[in-house]
């Protein structure tokens, strides 16, 4: 006995963590199965955390069972003692698992659980109160052993249930017993409760049993199974319970209890409560009740048990008439309240389940009709149940269906990965509790108990029953025959919110490994033929009525809006298309290559999109979204052609709010600061939103070449100088007087950040334009740069430089504020644009988009076969923060607060060598006083200043002599701002004799 029980738990005890708690919850359901088999309608589960007195007990050793316990009560149903003994026997469990003793799933369904043996998952001493009897099972022999001391005896009031052959039960009870001998006793409770109050206190305190047990003739109309929790490993089970493991089990049961009613016939109400140590009352945790009329379940049961599927007709056989499986749909409502205290909660939850049951599909009907299976009297019916609606406090509540399990009347805890549950007459492994799906799955049972799997055919023949064949047939039929009809039933039940339908899609990526083989190509082929593909206004359609968005490329909302107004599109999750394609089911797809082809074919897209930059940008993003794939495959020519195709489409938004075709004009890529230099070119600048979306393409030379885009830099500035603040009349003049207004000084400061004064090639582009600032307040044209003096690094106008930096910082701050406002507006808009896409929460599953009402342009959309992707490394275009004088485009300009400004030191650095000498400073001051052409350094970057400085004294002397000669020969006069009359440029009269001597002497020395 003890060894047999231990065998039932060894394999299951190998589980750990949550799996162990799931198995504990399953053991509770196995005990509840006894109530269903008995026809019980009301069941209570109590977690009793109290510890009871241990003075007045039937046996001293029973004090070990007075601690916290699990109590299960079957209301108004008294089990027979003989039946309890049978249900506690492992041998009978093995025998009954393979005969026609049916379990909680009803007639024709195998036993789900281990009977009363499941109680020993929790305890070593099971105590049962039923009617006027009290039964204890002590399989370890530890609870009724005290070294031979006699325990309570009252003739006729106690029976030893494990000693049936004894002629004198009473004397055998009081005989000395060996320790470890299994014991089971049955006591009559009449007169016992008052004598052993501590023993019966756990039962008397239960509210629904108290009055019956304290009456003059105690009789409880029901059965209470009490299982004191095991706190240390024993000879039959090493599973021990503490507060954490109990709470984990309770948490699982709270979810499972409302689902007890799905596939059972008798149970109508389930309650789970707890009794805290110091509490005087029970606290209800869950109260669940079946709201559906029980007669509907009875009707279904009656239909299933007509046995019409068994009948054969000789005439029908001649004409090969076939049985047609019957499908029954039923809606089941379950109310359940979850409470944390004895106070009732008004907010009951009402869950609605759709249950479909199929009777005798061909495959399992054939197996059930075989001679080897007929003795089992199996019912070839399978059910599917989906949670389709929830009401909370009277309002419909959004919810995500839980992962489904495999049921055999009750929840086995074996998850399938489906969003609905399966009920089938499945055979479980007697020791492991797993599903038998192959010949090797139960080899241990075949070895240990060969008679369990053998069937007698005729009088002498014995054959092995391949239960895995039956199990596999049941699951295959559920997924191939019943599932398509079930999905249609779900579709019809969700008419108020059809988008929720795809929550019940059998998504391959979510299916558990052990169950995946049961979802075959036949399953998805059957689904593909149904009207279950959602459109916006036409409802569900067949697969050939529209096309899908390619699951490989997510479609932005604007692109979705455009396509939905022109082509028939399905609004389905990406996973649906992925699953269909896995099984090579033909689906019409919209992919980026197909989108480009459609846009080129439909020339009117320019008129449609020219004033819709956001929609065009999303289309541009989608049309370019296969570039990554092309790069990965090194398909350079395909990438080149892709960019070429897009360059002919009206998809590039520019800053004036319109959309242009890049191939047609000189479209410029520039950041916001660069764009601020030419406000008249808003129709040429690519919109900053587009720059952000195109970031991954901006590092490729091929992108700019094929798209005919220009990068903002010296060449672009030179071509567009007539849009600058510089008057056209200045072009070609050597010198112009300059009124330094705020805009022009900032513009010039920005200009010299884009163009380097020390790069002759860039400077030549501006030879005709006076853009070089001088200390005299003039501007000279860039062709004169070689005659402009700059030899003292500290010679800049400090106040001017600080003013320029502050203006530049203010510009960058204004740009940063603009970026911030746009981000806030975008976040708000995103929540408004795509609310319907958030309704279906399927993890990483996204809704592609809703279809169109327009049906005039029926264009065949398919994958053009242009796979796409290339890996190209170029440096033509970067997104660096450096914007000094290269082709970099900085997408978002960093801002340094004005308070952090540090003015450059007026004292030259000692690292400048001879340039920083005092003599150079004096020479610089004299040349400025003389009105020589000295560069105003405040507009230039420090690195550029150092590069244009003379390398040594000889070069300095030559520069001064060259510049002075140019002034004497050609630049003889100067016109200062605000003065109309020209004056001599070099005014020698302003110099003192010492200054003149120093000017003449120092260059000669150098």
Image: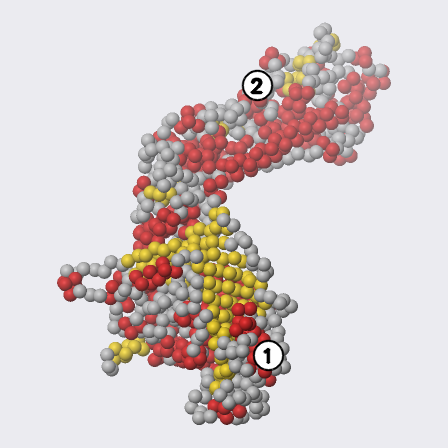
**Can you say whether 847 is above or below 409 in the image?**
above
The residue depicted at 58 percent of the width and 26 percent of the height is 675
Which one is nearer the viewer's eye here, 782 or 484?
484
Q: Residue 6: horizontal and vertical position, in percent?
A: 48, 79
Report helix, strand or loop for mark 1.
helix
Q: Residue at x 51, y 61 (%)?
A: 287
Residue in the foreground of this view, choosing between 942 and 186: 186
Position above or below: 23 against 181: above
Q: Point out residue 503 in the picture as x, y percentages from the top left corner.
A: 43, 50
Judging by the rendered image, the residue that carries numbered circle 2 is: 723
Tag 2 secondary structure: helix
- What residue is disc 1 on? 197
| Picture coordinates of residue 37, whole percent (x, y) | 40, 70
Q: Quadrant of residue 153?
A: bottom right
Side (left or right) of 835 relative to 449: right
**Residue placed at 64% from the left, 14% from the top?**
734
Residue nearest the viewer, comparing 911 with 859: 859
The answer to whether residue 101 shows anywhere in this view is yes
As drawn, 777 above or below 875: above
Q: Position of residue 458 (x, y in %)?
A: 23, 79
Mark 2: give few (<14), some (14-19) or many (20+) Cα within 10 Å: some
Q: Earlier in the sequence, mark 1 or mark 2?
A: 1
């Amino acid at each position: 006995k003890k060894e047999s029980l231990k065998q039932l738990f060894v394999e299951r005890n190998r589980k750990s963590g949550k799996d162990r708690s799931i198995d504990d919850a399953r053991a509770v359901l196995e005990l509840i199965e006894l109530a269903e088999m008995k026809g019980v309608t009301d069941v209570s589960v109590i977690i009793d955390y109290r510890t009871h007195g241990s003075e007045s007990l039937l046996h001293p050793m029973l004090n070990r069972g007075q601690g916290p316990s699990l109590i299960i009560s079957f209301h108004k149903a008294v089990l027979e003692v003989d039946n309890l003994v049978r249900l506690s026997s492992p041998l009978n469990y093995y025998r009954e698992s393979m005969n026609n003793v049916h379990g909680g799933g009803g007639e024709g369904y195998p036993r789900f659980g281990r009977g009363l043996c499941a109680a020993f998952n929790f305890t070593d001493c099971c105590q049962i109160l039923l009617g006027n009897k009290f039964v204890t099972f002590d399989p370890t022999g530890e609870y009724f052993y005290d070294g031979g001391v006699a325990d309570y005896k009252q003739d006729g009031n106690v029976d030893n249930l494990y000693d049936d052959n004894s002629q004198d039960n009473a004397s055998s009870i009081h005989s000395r017993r060996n320790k470890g001998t299994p014991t089971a006793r049955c006591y009559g409770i009449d007169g016992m409760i008052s004598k052993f109050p501590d023993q019966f206190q756990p039962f008397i305190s239960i509210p629904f049993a108290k009055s019956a047990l304290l009456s003059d003739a105690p009789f409880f109309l029901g059965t209470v199974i009490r299982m004191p929790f095991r706190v240390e490993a024993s000879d039959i089970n090493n599973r021990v319970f503490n507060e954490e493991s109990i709470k984990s089990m309770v948490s699982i049961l709270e979810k499972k209890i409302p689902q007890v009613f799905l596939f059972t016939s008798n149970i109508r109400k389930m309650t789970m409560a707890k009794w805290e140590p110091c509490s005087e009352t029970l606290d209800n945790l869950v109260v669940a009740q079946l709201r559906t009329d029980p007669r509907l379940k009875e009707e279904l049961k009656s239909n299933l048990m007509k046995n019409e599927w068994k009948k054969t007709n000789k005439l029908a056989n001649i004409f090969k008439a076939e049985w047609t499986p019957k499908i029954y749909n039923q809606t089941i409502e379950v109310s359940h309240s979850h409470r944390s205290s004895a106070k009732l909660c008004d907010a009951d939850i009402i869950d609605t389940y759709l249950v479909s049951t199929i009777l005798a599909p061909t495959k399992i009907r054939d197996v059930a009709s075989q001679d080897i299976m007929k003795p089992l009297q199996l019912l070839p019916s399978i059910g599917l149940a989906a949670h389709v609606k929830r009401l909370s406090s009277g309002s419909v509540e959004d919810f995500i269906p839980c992962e489904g399990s495999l049921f055999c009347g009750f929840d086995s805890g074996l998850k399938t990965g489906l969003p609905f549950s399966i009920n089938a007459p499945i055979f479980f492994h007697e020791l492991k509790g797993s599903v038998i799906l192959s010949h090797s799955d139960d080899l241990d049972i075949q070895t240990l108990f060969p008679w369990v799997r053998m069937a007698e055919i005729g009088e002498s023949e014995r054959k092995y029953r391949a239960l895995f064949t039956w199990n596999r047939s049941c699951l295959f039929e559920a997924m191939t025959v019943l599932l398509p009809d079930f999905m249609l039933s779900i579709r019809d039940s969700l008419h108020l919110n059809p988008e929720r339908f795809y929550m019940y899609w059998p998504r391959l990526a979510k299916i558990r490994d052990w169950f995946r083989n049961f979802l075959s190509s036949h399953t998805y082929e059957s689904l593909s033929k149904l009207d279950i593909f959602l459109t916006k206004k036409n409802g569900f359609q067949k697969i050939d009525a529209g096309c899908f968005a390619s699951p490989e490329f997510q479609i932005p909302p604007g692109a979705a809006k455009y396509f939905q107004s022109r082509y028939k599109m399905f609004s389905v999750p990406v996973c649906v298309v992925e699953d269909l394609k896995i099984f090579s089911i033909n689906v019409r797809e919209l992919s980026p290559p197909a989108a480009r082809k459609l846009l080129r074919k439909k020339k009117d897209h320019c008129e449609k999109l020219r004033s819709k930059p956001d929609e065009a940008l999303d289309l541009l993003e989608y049309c370019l979204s296969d570039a990554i794939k092309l790069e990965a495959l090194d398909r350079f020519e395909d990438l080149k052609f892709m960019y070429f195709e897009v360059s002919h489409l009206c998809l590039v938004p520019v800053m004036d709010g319109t959309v242009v075709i890049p191939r047609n004009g000189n479209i410029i890529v520039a950041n916001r600061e660069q764009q601020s230099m030419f406000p008249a070119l808003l129709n040429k600048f690519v919109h900053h939103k587009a720059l952000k979306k195109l970031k991954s393409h901006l590092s490729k030379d091929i992108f700019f070449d094929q798209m005919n885009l220009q990068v903002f830099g010296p060449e672009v500035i030179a071509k567009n100088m007539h849009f600058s603040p510089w008057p056209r009349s200045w072009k070609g003049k050597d010198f112009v007087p300059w009124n330094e207004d705020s805009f022009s000084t900032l513009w010039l400061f920005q200009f010299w950040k884009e163009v380097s004064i020390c790069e002759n090639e860039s400077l030549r582009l501006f030879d005709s334009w006076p853009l070089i600032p001088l200390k005299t307040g003039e501007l000279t044209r860039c062709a004169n740069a070689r005659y402009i003096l700059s030899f003292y690094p500290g010679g800049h106008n400090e106040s001017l430089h600080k003013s320029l930096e502050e203006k530049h910082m203010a510009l960058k701050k204004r740009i940063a504020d603009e970026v911030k406002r746009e981000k806030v507006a975008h976040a708000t808009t995103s929540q408004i644009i795509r609310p319907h896409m958030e309704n279906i929460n399927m993890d990483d599953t996204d809704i592609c988009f809703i279809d169109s009402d327009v049906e005039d342009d029926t264009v065949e959309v398919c994958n053009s076969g242009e796979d796409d992707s290339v890996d190209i490394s170029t440096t033509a275009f970067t997104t660096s923060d450096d914007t000094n004088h290269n082709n970099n485009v900085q997408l978002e300009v960093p801002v340094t607060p004005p308070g952090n400004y540090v003015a450059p030191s007026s004292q030259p650095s000692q690292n400048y060598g001879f340039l920083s000498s005092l003599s150079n400073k004096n020479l610089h001051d004299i040349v400025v006083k003389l009105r020589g052409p000295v560069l105003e350094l405040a507009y230039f970057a420090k690195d550029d200043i150092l590069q244009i400085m003379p390398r040594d004294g000889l070069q300095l002397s030559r520069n001064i002599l060259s510049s002075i000669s140019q002034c004497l020969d050609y630049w003889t006069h100067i016109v200062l701002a605000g003065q109309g009359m020209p004056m001599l440029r070099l005014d020698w009269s302003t110099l003192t004799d010492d200054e003149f001597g120093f000017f003449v002497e120092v260059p000669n020395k150098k």
